[in-house]
Amino acid sequence: MMTASCTTISVDFEEGANPEMYFQRAQMASDRNDFELAQRIYYKLLETGITDPFYVVSAKYEIAFLNYKLGKREEAIQNFEEILKTYYEDPAWEGRVPQWPQVLSKRLLQKLKPAEGATPPSP
């Protein structure tokens, strides 16, 4: 009998697949500490041309957080700053964008961009 940890996580999705499927597979990859695979899945979702603000911002946050976990400090900072711009530059998305990515992006930016002269903590 094959256990769940031995199964391969596919990055191939049927056209029109529910975005939740992408998030489930990416979470499975993250649970296995395969952060690069999880990122590939989130990027694949964004490449579908999805326009739902909830899924777009959520996927972008997950990509940024995975960069943080992978120790890709500069990429993570850039990703989190891009996410925050979403909340200020696109009034059409107001009220349709979840607030948790904004809150968590601000917190992680504070960790990644410490006060002048301080040493940034490890992820």
Image: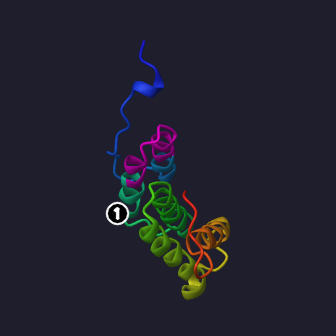
How many numbered callouts?
Answer: 1
Q: In the picture provided, is 9 more to the left or to the right than 18?
A: left
> Which residue is depicted at the point 56% across and 68% down?
120
> Which residue is depicted at the point 42% across and 43% down?
34
Q: In the picture provided, is 25 more to the left or to the right than 105?
A: left
In the displayed structure, 93 sits above or below 30; it is: below
Point out the image quarter for the C terminus: bottom right
Residue placed most toward the observer, 112 or 19: 112
Q: Position of residue 68 (x, y in %)?
A: 50, 60
Q: Which SS does the magenta portion mostly show? A: helix
Residue placed most toward the observer, 62 or 119: 119
Q: Amino acid at mark 1?
A: Glu
Residue placed most toward the observer, 5 or 96: 5
Number of other residues with Cα within 10 Å of mark 1, as a class: few under 14, some 14 to 19, many 20 or more: few
> Which residue is depicted at the point 47% across and 71% down?
79
Task: List the residue tagged with mark 1.
Answer: 47
Q: Position of residue 101 (x, y in %)?
A: 61, 67
Provide the residue span drawn in magenta.
24-39
Query: Is-magenta flag for residue 30?
Result: yes
In the displayed structure, 84 sits above or below 48; it is: below
Extreme residue in the top direction: 1
- State the image quarter where residue 45 is shown: bottom left
